[in-house]
Image: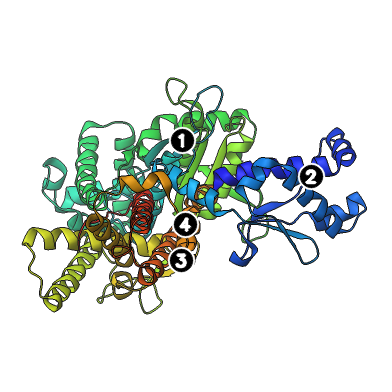
Amino acid sequence: MLRLSKILNKKVVKALSRAFPEEALAADINGETLDAQLVPASKPEFGDFQINGALQLAKLLNQSPQKIAAAIVEQLQNDREFSTMFKPPEIAGPGFINITLNNRCLEAEVTQHLQDERLGVPLVNPSPETKEGSRIVIDFSSPNIAKEMHVGHLRSTIIGDSLARILEFRGHQVLRLNHLGDWGTQFGMLISYLKLVAPEALATANAVDLGDLVNFYRQAKQRFDEDECFQTTSREEVINLQSGDPIALQAWELLCNQSRKEFQQIYDKLDIRITERGESFYNQYLEGVIKDLDANGILVNDQGAKCIFLEGITGKNGKPFPMIIQKSDGGFNYATTDLAAIRYRFNSLPNGDEAQRLIYVTDAGQANHFKGIFQIAKRANWIPNGGLLEHVPFGLVHGEDGKKLKTRSGDTVRLRDLLDEAINRAESDLRHRLEEEGREESAAFIKHVSNTVGIAAIKYADLSQNRMTNYQFSFDKMLALQGNTAPYLLYALVRIAGITRKGGDISHSTDKLQFSEPQEWCLIRELLKFDEVIIEVEEQLLPNRLCSYLFGLSQVFNRFYDQVPVLKADEPNRGCRLTLCKLTADTLQLGMNLLGLPTLERM
Ligand code: ARG
């Protein structure tokens, strides 16, 4: 209803200034406006919109709220167009005004949406210089080489991808970046260790798989902690790598490729597009960061290390926390690379392509890290006018026992196994259902449906939670056909698609839609909320809002379909109701696309 609420808002502003011309003028001179506080109705019985401002205006205008409300209503009713769109407004309680769309207006709005593939969602206002939305970097997924991608990365991947889709749909230019952990001291350990125990891994591709690498990494770390001599060789190996030694570089590249291949398999399964620009990319800019910070006078020498004392962020001793930018041995940190990345993303992308907004999707545990580097970026003057830095945090994934998700043997769960298990369980659920229904389906069908349901279930289980809360990973819950789950939504979509298929051609009915049943109006009002929900998700970066909306919409649809005849109704009702089915299917489909959920024709 964004379009309608915009029109209404203009009318309300006008009505208020006509009702109180002198006061409106006076406010205007002071650079203010009288605010009528127009908002969507908080309950269906209040209509579609409410004007709440009369109470607060009472003092300013020196009149009772009821009188103010009556004056606004009178002016609204003088507006001829207003009366064609809305029912006569009602004044309620101490001076609230309830406004309800009239049926013809709702019907016209449905007709508009049927012809609009964006379903009412506007493109962002073109900015005058670029004529396009803002340039946004979303930094998400970002697993680490030679380590398994874990459930934290899974959350980042799923949430980041859906936010990217929504921002892209709104017309922003989105650059999806994978800030892969592909640099740093761990490579020194790993390369030294492999030289000792599996030199072939450093010279030939595919000699080891990621599972082996992860084990080698663990052993290397242990050796590092115990063996001083090994520490020295490891440090030397890091220096070799950083100074571009060809053998070290080749080994590093082999290790990266091995992990990369595994990560890609997961991205393929999840249908994720992302551009790799790992930590190593910023290596060439690290010195520049130090110089810049030094020139800005914020770098402090602390026992040989270069650090910055953060303002307003204290360490354990209650004193400003020192963020180490360069260690005493000359090495750089995770934070240094992130600083280089901010500076680069804001200032030095080629052909004036600098980002205007940087969004980081990581677990909430990194909140202080981001607070720190954002503060430093600000103090270093790297943030352009209007530039935005945002950390989008999320909570932990717990197992059904309420503790950190682990395998039965106590190991961290591998993502690949997690996805496979969801797919396998979806398959056995499906086979069970087919047997119950006495249905025969091809192997290809079973494979396709299980894959889609399994992946959608995993994604939706994550997206449907407020990202800030920890969530409990449960295959049983996420795969259930009932409740706020992906299978429920997929099933609603399949069901509606089936109905519209049976309904045949309904193009004739769209010219003159007419409705009469309360269930129809209820569904229409729900359908018309889609655009507002998308804007809200964009503003708050909370995909769970869209999930609840789609779930609610499916429920309202099911009630409509259970209580009002559709295929068996007479014309013109039949055609009109079928168009509501079609619009519901389109809305679910678009909403699910924006969440990155795959959909099905049949299941
Ligand atoms: N590799 C990091 C991790 O596994 C996440 C990186 C997030 N992005 C960033 N620019 N720091 O925790």
How far is disc 2 from disc 3 in space, using C-alphas? 35 Å
Q: Is residue 277 left or right of residue 330?
A: left
Which residue is identified by label 3? 519
**How many other residues sit within 10 Å of disc 4, few (<14), some (14-19) or many (≥20)?**
many
- CA gap between label 1 and label 2 equals 35 Å
Q: Residues within 10 Å of mark 3 (few under 14, many from 20)?
A: some
Spatial separation of the CA atoms under disc 1 and disc 4: 29 Å
> Gap between marks 3 and 4, in whole Å?
9 Å
Q: Kindly identify which residue carries mark 2.
A: 16
The answer to which of marks 3 and 4 sits earlier in the sequence is: 3
Q: Amino acid at mark 1?
A: His
Going from N to C along the chain, the mark reached first, 3 or 1, is: 1
Q: Residue 227 placed where, x, y %?
A: 30, 58
Residue at image x 57%, y 34%? 387
- Residue 46 vs residue 197, the one in the foreground: 46
Are the residues tagged 1 and 4 within 8 Å (C-beta)?
no
| Residue 476, image quadrant | bottom left
Residue at 66 percent of width and 45 percent of height: 82
Say which quadrant the C terminus sits in.
bottom left
Looking at the rendered structure, the kind of residue marked 2 is: Leu
